[in-house]
Image (tube, helix red, strand yellow):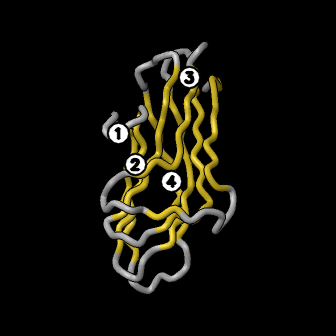
Amino acid sequence: MGTYVDGRTSQNASFANSIAIPILVVDTPQLFGQIGLITDGVGTNPRVILKGTISVQLPLALVGITVTIVRGTLATDPLVYSATSTFNLSILAPQVITFSADDFLPTITPQLTYTAFISSNLLGTIRVGPESFDGILVSD
């Protein structure tokens, strides 16, 4: 049975259409969430459970949206999760993207930092909210 060690939430936008942040550079990760989990008291077999949601308004074109999570603060840090969704031309309403990821047996430091990024392969994508990213650290 797992023991709860720490949990954090990064809530950038709580409501639909509450922000309008354009993605201005194609295929370049844009930060939308970051958490730091304190590892004091962690036992054996540590694991981090991550989840989140982000909503985007898409241009009227075939577009691919990628969500990535790294252990660290930079897009080049160790990759924990990556997924790409491709949307077609007929989608007019904002699209909600949800994700769930796990990091098994991370190297334990005093704080584990996780950062969530979004990127688009086409200009015209706008982050519109809600945006949320959270995680918990458990161990045996």
Q: Residue at x 48, y 21 (%)?
A: 45
Give SS at disc 3: strand
Labels 1 and 2 touching (C-beta < 8 A): yes
Say which residue label 4 marks: 99
Q: Earlier in the sequence, mark 3 or mark 4?
A: 4
Callout 4 amino acid: Phe
Callout 1 amino acid: Leu
Q: CA distance from mark 3 to mark 1?
A: 21 Å
Say which residue label 3 marks: 139
Callout 3 amino acid: Ser
Q: Residue at x 42, y 32 (%)?
A: 72
Q: In the image shown, does 80 or 74 lie closer to the viewer?
A: 74
Q: Earlier in the sequence, mark 1 or mark 4?
A: 1
Among the 4 quarters of the image, the one containing residue 93? bottom right
Q: Earlier in the sequence, mark 2 or mark 3?
A: 2
Q: In the image shown, does 47 or 117 lie closer to the viewer?
A: 117
Q: How far from the left and from the top, in percent, is residue 48?
A: 52, 33
Q: Nearer the viewer, mark 3 or mark 4?
A: 4
Q: Is residue 67 left or right of residue 131?
A: left
Please tell me how crowded label 1 is: few (under 14), some (14-19), or many (20+) other residues with Cα within 10 Å.
some
Q: Residue at x 35, y 67 (%)?
A: 64
Labels 1 and 4 touching (C-beta < 8 A): no
Q: Residue at x 52, y 70 (%)?
A: 95
Say which residue label 1 marks: 79
Callout 2 amino acid: Thr
Residue 56 to residue 36: above or below: below
Q: CA distance from mark 3 to mark 4?
A: 22 Å
Say which residue label 2 marks: 68
Q: CA distance from mark 1 to mark 2?
A: 7 Å
